[in-house]
Amino acid sequence: MKLSLPTPDTDFSRDVLGRYICNTFDEMLVTIDPNARAASGLPARGDLRPFDFIVIGGGTFGSTLAEDLWFRATSRTERILVLEGGPFFLPEHVQNLPGLGIKNPDARKDHLPQSEVWGLAWNSNDPIGFPGLAYCLGGRSVFWGGWSPRLLDSETPTSAWPPSVLNDLNPTRLPDGSKGYFRQSSDQIGVTATNDFIFGDLHHAMRSQLFDGLTAGGITDAIALASLPDHPAAVYSDTPFTLAELAALLGVDLPNPLPSGVQLTQLEEKLRNLAKLEAPLAVQGQPGHAGFFPFNKFSAVPLLTKATREAVTESAGDDVKKRVMVVPRCHVIRLNTISDAGGQRVYELVTERGNISVSPDTKVILALAGRAGPATWWSLAAVRSRRGWRRSNGSRCRRSCPAERGRMEPESAAPTGRRCLRSSVRRTTSRRSTRTCTATGTGRRRYGLTHASSNA
Ligand SMILES: Cc1cc2nc3c(=O)[nH]c(=O)nc-3n(C[C@H](O)[C@H](O)[C@H](O)COP(=O)(O)OP(=O)(O)OC[C@H]3O[C@@H](n4cnc5c(N)ncnc54)[C@H](O)[C@@H]3O)c2cc1C
């Protein structure tokens, strides 16, 4: 059994990050299974507890969800397990590690591994193939472009999106005074701030060229700038965004003296439209809060790092008390289910490292990857629940389902297999407490990605 492994050395490095963030399968198992403890010669303990949440897939959504569950856990007792098929790979986005030279994967069909951790999980029906998945902690967030446009109203029709969801996502302020969820995630990943490394004369020149081309009608099928929402910094400003703030956002000087009347209105309109061309990138140049270094291009790994290290501190190094565990290189092969009094539930996970019994109260969350799309939006915006997963009456309903946050309904009323958000989370559930969620993504057309559609 692999227990209490010291930090491994390779010919090149000491695997401090891997060891400090992750646990082996055996280290995890002996915190829940008395038989595994006995088999490994560890003393019996009366305080072994199952995990409350098991997140399968420690990629973009899975890592961020695990971190969110950790920080939102109001009773400070919940245990969270992340099972990731790949290894710990990079501590943050590949572009934050200058000149590393690990390139983005090519679209292919041959299933051969590439770029250290990429592999094809399924067959693509696209003639040019598909880059596949980044099998590592952080998943594709370690490679992604960071392009995070807010969904347009036309993309979130009320015919398909529950008004309560839109009312949580879209407003600048929620009724309780906190920020709307799109705004929160924009702040957290850096979308509302100017990109610190895409700024300056060359950038201004290119933006002007694009603006001139667009306004002259040179780009067919372009959405009219006037019909697009303002730059997130202007949209989410608590006070009317001034001309001076617009100029600062764009890094341009205002004419001195300022024009007046119609010309002033035209100037403001032009600056607003120019700002709409700024890429809403998940790049953070300023610290989120005191004592925090900015993480620059967003990836999910720093979030998971923080959660796991805090869990170590809280448990004082006692794994049985550790509430966040991440087991890498643990491909989940099958979910075994049974039907019992409460309906169908997962009772066992079959993994490449062995089987894990699943308690009836455990929530199993599938975060194994969807298609290209705003998973980061969802992972940051959607799961920020005002009430967590605890009902206001105090009973447990640990749904991490974004569509339901803050307005839990009686479990008996929850329909099965309902698609609860148009793309982000699909509940394939029973009517009892053990629920299974799958995270997927959409919005591919807005990112110009090379991702092919798949027939998965
Ligand atoms: C080069 C590139 C650029 C992109 N740019 C953008 C962009 O600008 N804007 C945007 O919104 N989106 C972009 N995307 C898409 C975006 O990165 C993805 O939609 C998003 O990261 C998907 O998140 P996810 O959590 O669903 O999946 P992933 O991040 O892929 O995570 C899935 C995880 O599940 C693990 N896993 C899979 N199977 C198993 C198993 N059986 N057992 C255990 N673990 C398993 C994988 O190892 C992986 O870690 C880009 C993607 C790429 C590749």
Image (cartoon, helix red, strand yellow):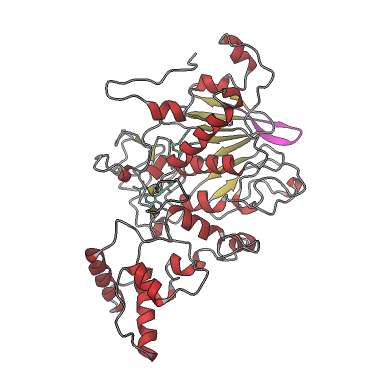
Looking at the image, residue 345 sits to the left or right of residue 275; the answer is: right
Most extreme residue toward the front is 290
Magenta stretch: give its range: 338-349
Point 48% across, 69% down: residue: 235
Task: Give the total of numbered labels.
Answer: 0
Name the residue: 72% across, 47% down: 391
Name the residue rendered at 30%, 25% in the picture. 13
Residue 160 vs residue 392: left or right?
Answer: left
Residue 363 location, quadrant? top right
Please provide percent x and percent y for residue 309.
Answer: 50, 33
Q: Where is residue 254 in the image (x, y as percent from the top left)?
A: 31, 78
State which image quarter holds ligand 1.
Answer: top left
What's the magenta bit mostly, secondary-structure-wise?
A: strand
Q: In this view, does 407 lie above or below 114?
A: below
Residue 319 inside the magenta-drawn segment: no
Q: Position of residue 12 (x, y in %)?
A: 27, 24
The answer to whether 29 appears left or right of 129 in the picture is: right
Residue 55 image position (x, y, % from top left): 55, 36
